Amino acid sequence: QVHLVESGGGLVQAGGSLRLSCVASGRALGIYVMGWFRRPPGKEREFVATISQSSGSTKYADSVLGRFTISRDNAKNTVYLQMNNLKPEDAAVYYCAPVRSILLPQPPAGFSSWGQGTQVTVSS
């Protein structure tokens, strides 16, 4: 199983930026299509962005399109999420995970290796 550790969250004012990182161990990250998800307070976990193994394809939730950018460095076993122009509604715990495909950005059946996530708080 791949072990995932997210970091980079924090408190930022609306309009500010953060860069999240997700470092993997146990498996080479390059074999996975990877995604970022978030769980807003009191809500279910939701899809944010996904990126193909070679970084050739990406997909974003409508709510973050044009503001967030997903990227990866397979040599460092790391996936990133650059978040610009943050809004209060972006506040959530952010997680990374492998996903089935770009068009089906859901973790594989039986996936349970969620990391602890990283908290993003946006003040208005």
Image (spheres, rainbow, N blue to C red):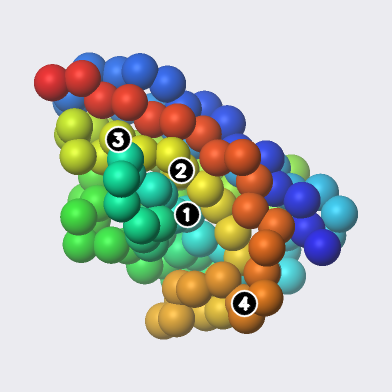
Label pair 2/1, CB-CB below 8 angstroms:
yes
Query: What secondary structure is found at the residue carrying circle 4?
Result: loop
- The nearer-to-camera label among 4 and 1 is 4
Q: Which mark is first along the chain, 1 or 2?
A: 1
Position of residue 96 in the picture relative to residue 91 (left or right)? right
Q: Callout 3: few (<14), some (14-19), or many (20+) C-alpha neighbours within 10 Å?
A: many
Q: Quadrant of the C terminus?
A: top left
Choose mark 2 or mark 1, whichever is in front. 2
Q: CA distance from mark 2 to mark 3?
A: 9 Å
Per the model, the C-alpha gap separating discs 2 and 1 is: 7 Å
Quadrant where the image shows the N terminus = bottom right
Q: Which mark is residue 18?
A: none
Labels 4 & 2 near each other (Cβ < 8 A): no
Q: Which residue is mark 2?
A: 94
Could you say which quadrant of the image residue 116 lies in? top right
For residue 91, the mark is 3
In the image, taking residue 13 as reference, residue 33 lies left or right, namely right
What's the amino acid at mark 2?
Answer: Tyr
Mark 1 sits on what residue?
36
Could you tell which of marks 4 and 2 lies nearer the N-terminus? 2
Q: Residue extending furthest front?
A: 42
**Rounded to the nearest whole Å, what is the CA distance between mark 1 and mark 3?**
14 Å
The residue positioned 55% from the left and 52% from the top of the image is 96
